[in-house]
Image (cartoon, helix red, strand yellow):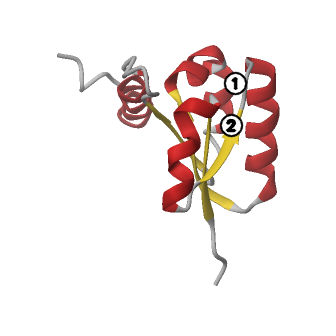
Amino acid sequence: MKTYHIAILGSKDAILGFKAIGVKPVSVTSKTEMLEKLEKLCDSGEYAVLLITEDFFAQGKDEVFELSKRPLPAIIPIPSHRGSEGLGQEKIKRIVEQAVGSDILDK
């Protein structure tokens, strides 16, 4: 059975603490660097989950959604140390809307 790993992409300040719990921190400083490293991690076949801070997720949202169509890894936006921008909820809403055919999560 193959063992998969978890990585997190974001600014150094936002991701360093994750190393203590076994998550591989991948520091990025620009949209271009984030997309290059994200694609490399996706293509490696070593990761089941890739966390990405919402600030960088927002910068490359369309490209990240395309990569998210693969079965693995799951790409999950999480709040950075600056707080949530609601992008994780938006991603779930988009996935549910695609699966069901309408927006059932609208308030």
Q: Is residue 62 above or below residue 64?
A: above
Q: Is residue 55 above or below residue 18?
A: above
**In front of the other: 19 or 88:** 19
Residue 26 located left or right of residue 78:
right
Percent across and percent down for residue 89 are: 35, 27
Identified at 39% across, 33% down, the residue is 92
Q: Quadrant of residue 105?
A: top left
Identified at 23% across, 18% down, the residue is 106
The kind of residue tagged 1 is Glu
Q: Secondary structure at mark 2?
A: helix
Residue 32 located left or right of residue 83:
right
Residue 40 located left or right of residue 84:
right
Q: Which mark is residue 13?
A: none
Q: Quadrant of residue 3?
A: bottom right
Q: Are marks 1 and 2 in contact (CB under 8 Å)?
A: yes
Q: Disc count in the image?
A: 2
**In front of the other: 79 or 89:** 79
Percent across and percent down for residue 65 are: 61, 29
The quadrant in which the C terminus is found is top left
Identified at 62% across, 63% down, the residue is 5
**In front of the other: 71 or 24:** 24
Identified at 72% across, 30% down, the residue is 28
Q: CA distance from mark 1 to mark 2?
A: 6 Å
* Residue highlighted by disc 1: 63
* Residue highlighted by disc 2: 67
Percent across and percent down for residue 43 are: 80, 51
